[in-house]
Amino acid sequence: MVVSVLEEMRIRSLGVIDDAVVELSPGFTAVTGETGAGKTMVVTSLGLLLGGRADAALVRIGARNAVVEGRIAVPEGSPAVVRAEEAGAELDEGTLLVSRTVSAEGRSRAHLGGRSVPVGLLAELADDLVAMHGQSDQQGLLKLSRQRQALDRYAGYAVAVPLGKYAEAYKRLRAVAVELEEITTRARERAQEADLLRFGLEEIAAVEPRAGEDTELAEEAERLGHAEALASAAAVAHAALAGNPEDPEGVDAGTLVAGAQRALEAVRAHDPALAALTDRIGEIGILLRDVAGELAGYADDLDADPLRLAAVEERRAALTALTRKYGEDVAAVLAWAERSAARLTELEGDDERIGELTAERDALRVELGALAEELSQARAEAAERFAAAVTEELASLAMPHARVSFEIRQTEDPDGVEVNGRTVAYGPSGVDEVELLLAPHPGAPPRPIAKGASGGELSRVMLAVEVVFAGTDPVPTYLFDEVDAGVGGKAAVEIGRRLARLAKKAQVVVVTHLPQVAAFADRQLLVEKTNDGSVTRSGVKVLEGEDRVRELSRMLAGQEDSETARAHAEELLAAARADA
């Protein structure tokens, strides 16, 4: 099966590294060197390349920025390739180029396949490409939450399916509980709000405003307030257009226009232009009569009743009282009433809603208890298999009598959910507290690994766990940063042998100080400083032949030229090759 492989990294101006190229084996690569030579910078570089947190302190003093570039061979159609292509990245003959730049000011930039991408995208790809383990990861394994996550990861679909159902029901229960709490704790405020809305709606209903009524009343009030002046003006205008009955000798506009029309009618036949003018004068006469008639009707219909004016002003005052409180005009008041009626319906339905939510909450708690029981059973079944597999791996890591087991327990809580007749505490991941126990030798009681495992034992337990994962949920590359800390002798040989076997399924990179581990590597890289304390391009080199024997001798005895150390180093290499 073709898997992703990290082929090469170039590191510039990062920590003690000035400019170095790290060429990795597709199998097992061991990174060695003196303490403080910069081996950990290899791990840091890979962390940056895969979306780790940037820190300006990593930039080499005097440099503007630190740069890490990586070349990863990825199989076509893999999740990493699909995600990279979605981001616009381009592959170079099956190779994905990744780079990360960190400035001296702490700013960070990422590029993937020649395209600038968010740093978070690199972190997404890391989940599919690399499993990183260091001293901090060992400490993380001591946390109960991490132990539960490890068990769930091993169980796969057997736990993932019921856990997904449980998480969905838990989310709904939390939402119902929050809404129920909000309604009940804010009951007084909501009652006060309902009273205010009810008062406002009753006040508006008592007035019964109509849309546009305020405009109509304003116009009527203006007309009634000037009724006498309007009537007088209409009468004068009517007399000017149609004549005054009390003055039969007076001349009005209608009479004058009629005379003009008669004068032209006698001769219009002789000139079409004059005939047209005659017609237009006739139209003027008709218009004058129409206007005069409307003026007469206006004067007759004009209401100068002071009682009506008083009624209009009183109505306007009532509308003004509403617009002062609820809106700038009657239309806004009516809109407020519509919104408030809907809100009041909602508030008045609280009691009913509380009942509905309480019933839903109780039903969800029952459902959650049933799902939690199913989830616990799936974890218990997976725990037996997981513990047996890790125990078997520990036998290969010089812990033949060690036994690993899981304790899955629940905590009583009167506010919890019912599981198997007990009311227990619950959370987003179920009701289980999962703890990894270790009995390092026969007769020893199983104890939590946080209390019962030494540093070396903890390193081997973590390696065993990762090896078990490799058989069930593999990733292409495993990076171990001194996972062999606190280990020596035969245990170190067994760790080297187990890492070599793991490397047959995936790429393995190990930063180590143990020659017994390094001897099993397909490729050994030496990180060494120059006289000025920096790691240059030539400071990370592949060791072969005599050079590798010298480095293993140094790791064994601190003396490259010791004949005894050389012999031991050659023996380690020969044993590792024979084991392969």
Image (cartoon, grey):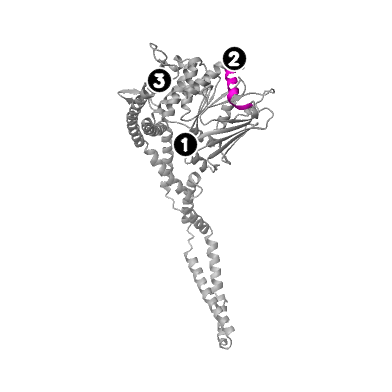
The part of the image, by quadrant, that contains residue 529 is top right
Q: In this picture, which residue range is highlighted in magenta?
A: 539-558
Camera sees residue 335? yes
Vertical side of 88 occupied by 360: above or below: above
Q: What residue occupies the far left of the structure in this picture?
A: 421
Which residue is denoted by mark 3 in the rendering? 391
**Alpha carbon distance from label 2 to label 1:** 43 Å
Q: What residue occupies the far bottom of the structure in this picture?
A: 270
In the foreground, 169 or 142: 142
Disc 3 marks a residue whose amino acid type is Thr
In the foreground, 576 or 287: 576
Q: Earlier in the sequence, mark 2 or mark 3?
A: 3
Judged left or right of residue 101, residue 315 is: left
Comparing labels 3 and 1, the label whose residue is closer to the camera:
1
**Alpha carbon distance from label 2 to label 3:** 39 Å
Report helix, strand or loop for mark 3.
Answer: helix
**Alpha carbon distance from label 3 to label 1:** 30 Å
The part of the image, by quadrant, that contains residue 556 is top right
Magenta span has 144? no
Q: Earlier in the sequence, mark 3 or mark 1?
A: 1
Judged left or right of residue 553, residue 216 is: left
Quarter that holds the N terminus: top left
Report helix, strand or loop for mark 1.
Answer: loop
Disc 2 marks a residue whose amino acid type is Glu
In the foreground, 206 or 165: 165
Q: Earlier in the sequence, mark 2 or mark 1?
A: 1
Which residue is denoted by mark 2 in the rendering? 563
Residue 216 place in picture, x, y as percent? 48, 56
The part of the image, by quadrant, that contains residue 59 is top right
The crowding category of the residue bearing disc 3, from other C-alpha atoms within 10 Å (few below 14, some 14 to 19, many at least 20), is many
Which residue is denoted by mark 1 in the rendering? 2
Camera sees residue 245? no
